[in-house]
Amino acid sequence: MKINRLFEIIYILLQKERITAEELAERFEVSTRTIYRDIDVLSSVGIPVYMMKGRGGGIALLPNYILDKTILTEDERKNILASLRAVEAVDTNNSKEKHELIQKISSLFGNSYTDWIEIDFSSWNDYKNQSEIFQILKSAILSKKKIKFEYSNSKGEQTHRKVEPLKLCSKGGAWYLYGYCDKRCDYRFFKLTRINNLIIINEDTIHTAPSKILLTKNTYNNTKYIHMKLHIQKEMAYLFLL
């Protein structure tokens, strides 16, 4: 599409000081005449692109050009890049494409790319492959399909569940599935580490998740706690620092 080609031309010019129309035409598999028309379009909308003839000439942007700062504030640009980087970190699919997209947007904003976050869903001892479970749940949520799995509750009791997966949530260093449970006829949280034999079934979901699920207030004020002291060998203490 033309709009994608125009965007790509700007990105190329941001990465290179100068490029010829022939090189761009070969890259996009179009004629040089089409490239010249694209340059005219970019120039007409205020992009400071210019062409130089002769030896060593070509197409270039004015030095230090970045995306118009009147469109987004500095904080807004940083927040966009930070959000995209977080999405890339939690999504193991198409990471290369997302990485390249972030680099392009960073160049347009005139910012350097900062690789600031990395996430692995599995535990240190690889007790369960939470990453695989995460991807299956993500696929089910996006395709709006129900799931089946075996679930172990806090008492060690195992039950078979059919659930409408609605949202993945992270709280207190752990991942949870929020969904509508057919067995309980109500909305429930399911801890990912307690889910086994997870499959997607060909049944559509009908419920929707609220915009805000995790509450900031403490909902367990009335819960009775038992305080214990454990004596652990210092060589094994690292296993309890979770």
Image (cartoon, rainbow, N blue to C red):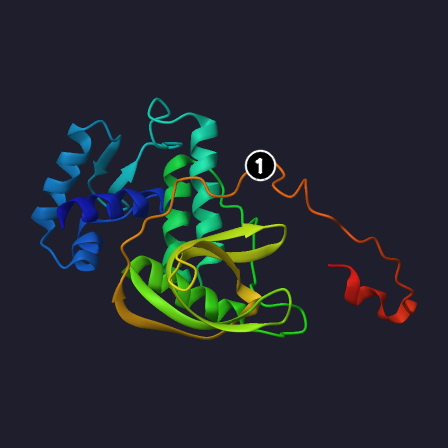
Return the x and y of residue 235 as percentages of the image width and height.
89, 71
Q: Residue at x 53, y 46 (%)?
A: 114
Between residues 157 and 242, which one lies in front from this camera angle?
A: 157
Residue sitting farthest toward the top: 70
Question: Is 180 above or below relative to 219?
Answer: below
Question: Is 120 above or below relative to 14?
Answer: below
- Residue 40 placement: quadrant: top left
Q: Residue at x 73, y 59 (%)?
A: 242
The number of callouts visible is 1
The amino acid at mark 1 is Thr
Q: Residue at x 63, y 64 (%)?
A: 154
Between residues 85 and 215, which one lies in front from this camera angle?
A: 215
Return the x and y of residue 139 as percentages of the image width and height.
35, 64
Return the x and y of residue 236 as percentages of the image width and height.
85, 70
Q: Is residue 175 left or right of residue 181?
A: right
Between residues 131 and 84, which one lies in front from this camera angle?
A: 131
Residue pointed to by mark 1: 216
Return the x and y of residue 68 as percentages of the image width and height.
33, 27
- Residue 230 placement: quadrant: bottom right
How many residues crowd mark 1 within 10 Å: few (<14), some (14–19), many (20+)? Answer: few
